[in-house]
Image (cartoon, coloured by chain):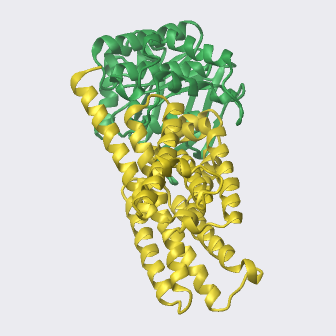
Amino acid sequence: MSGSPETLVRLTDASVGYNGAAVLEQMNLEIRRGSFVALLGPNGSGKSTLMKAIVGILPVLTGKLEYPSGTPRFGYVPQRDTLDPVYPLTAFEVVLMGTYGSIRPFSVVKRALRARAMQALRDARAEPLAGRLFADLSGGERQRVLIARALATDPECLVLDEPVAGIDQPTTEAIIQLATALNRNGMTILLVSHHLATLRGRVDEVVWIAGRKVVGGPAAAMLSTDKLAEMLISEKI
Amino acid sequence: MDLFLEMFSYDFLLRHALYASVIIGFVCPLVGVYLVLRRLVFLGVALPQISAAGIAFAYLMHTLGIHLYPHQEEEQLMALTGSVLFVVIALVILASLGQGRGLVEGRVGVAYAAAAAGSILFVAANPYGESTLLALLRGEVLGMSLSQFWATVCIYSGIALGTLLFQKEFTFVSFDREMAITLGKNVMAWDFCLYVIIGLAIAFGVMTVGPLLIFGFLVVPPLAARQITKGMWPFLLISSLIGGLTALVGFYLSLRWDLPLGPTDVAVACVILGITAAGKAIIARFGR
């Protein structure tokens, strides 16, 4: 992917991983402001690791991670199964957490921020879920609530980790449509997924992750039959 | 009923013990909520035992002639220092070893076993003051002095204030650490604050009411409240209410039938847990 003045995130010769052991090495990657980027690759290839490094959850082991126009506000949507259902939180309380970045300790959540959280629920078409226990929601409903929480951060870049894994087709379509609509309004979208068919025609750029390497480019080229065959062969190698 | 009303009269001899156990009953569940939510219930068993080992160790040091405080305040302060020190060291070690799944229960289990063995060995090695020490390890709230009562009021007010003021931060970093990091929260610092509060609640509580009751207050009221609440504030407040109610009813029953206070309180808490669990099951079966 070529550099531009609109670059939001830049990785240069970067290695990322856990406890000092690299999962992905020598990556060069740029994410442009306003783009819709899909991170594709097989299970365990390091898609989520790369995403966590980009948003600052994991440190870069070697090389550089830069935010050329300042650290963007990330709206992070984790894999919903990582959140423990033992918490008796309502969906609204979960969404309200998205506003905590702008609240100091000791402070109460002001009315404006509560309104922002409610608006985020509406934007994610999850308003009727507000008063229900998060743990009692279906997979698709939880995903909407987590997207609403990410929107409540007022993000410049929405980062979704496997948002449609294990979700039925109509809900998958609705979530991808929501991401597309947000992108049309100027929000940068970074999405990890396995669903090639759903993403085709929606995303601008694709990043393939396989064999500890990262290859990126325009969606049309990266999702062409030849490229897919090439990536599948490299995964097997 | 007369006995119940008498408990609140000014000349009731055990009023400080009553108020202290009710205060601890109200406050410990506010802390225990996070042990339950973080699935660290077993830590709620191990830490009071570690605190008891600290008390036994401090008494042994005292008997061996190692003194840290003026003589008239020696015993209580030494015991308190031992309790706090052991709990804080254990928390630091357990936290620094991380919370990777699989081995965490093993580490806590080893800490519990070591602390239980240590408590017995420290008492066995101490030729003097065994009865006083055993009373402390059991938690003799009935023999509480006025200064101990006011210390309990101050410490537990601070703990309650800390858990309520930082509720949203503690809940956020416990529920979704990664999201908290992306929003610039210092999750290590918040974990440290929470562990210090848990450590203080346990260390002081074991000195006052003993390890069994502290574990009961930490864990059982939140488990009962979890059955019937929706939302974090209701969960915290109902847990606290159940803890306070347990302490009050337990004290009355203990007085009425001359029962040991700690086990009576725990039994009352378990009955409340049984009622809430049965109520939830009935509602789930027959609908609202």
Above or below, A54 relative to B247 = above
- Answer above or below: position of A38 versus B88: above
Residue B245 in percent (x, y) is at 48, 44
Instruction: List x then y, in percent, for residue A122.
Output: 51, 9
Residue B12's spot in the image, x, y percent? 60, 57
Residue A27 lies, with reference to residue B190, above or below; the image says above
Who is closer to the viewer here, A232 or B18?
A: B18
Q: Does residue B190 appear in the picture of this structure?
A: yes
Location of residue B21 by image quarter: bottom right
- The one nearer the camera, A73 or A113, is A113
Q: Which residue is nearer to you in this view: B27 or A51? A: B27
Q: Which residue of the protein is positioned furthest toward the front in this rendering? A: B2
What is the count of numbered marks? 0
- Residue A206 at least partly seen: no
In the displayed orientation, state which residue is furthest to the left. Answer: B285
Q: Is residue B286 left or right of residue B135?
A: left
Residue at x-position 61% and y-position 44%: B163
Which image quarter: residue A113?
top right
Tell me: residue A112, above or below residue B24. above
Residue placed at 55% from the left, 13% from the top? A118
The foreground one among B17 and B237 is B17
Chain shown in yellow: B
- Residue A75, horizontal then vertical, whole percent: 56, 24
Instruction: Name chain A's colour.
Output: green
Q: State the residue at coordinates (55%, 38%).
A: B171
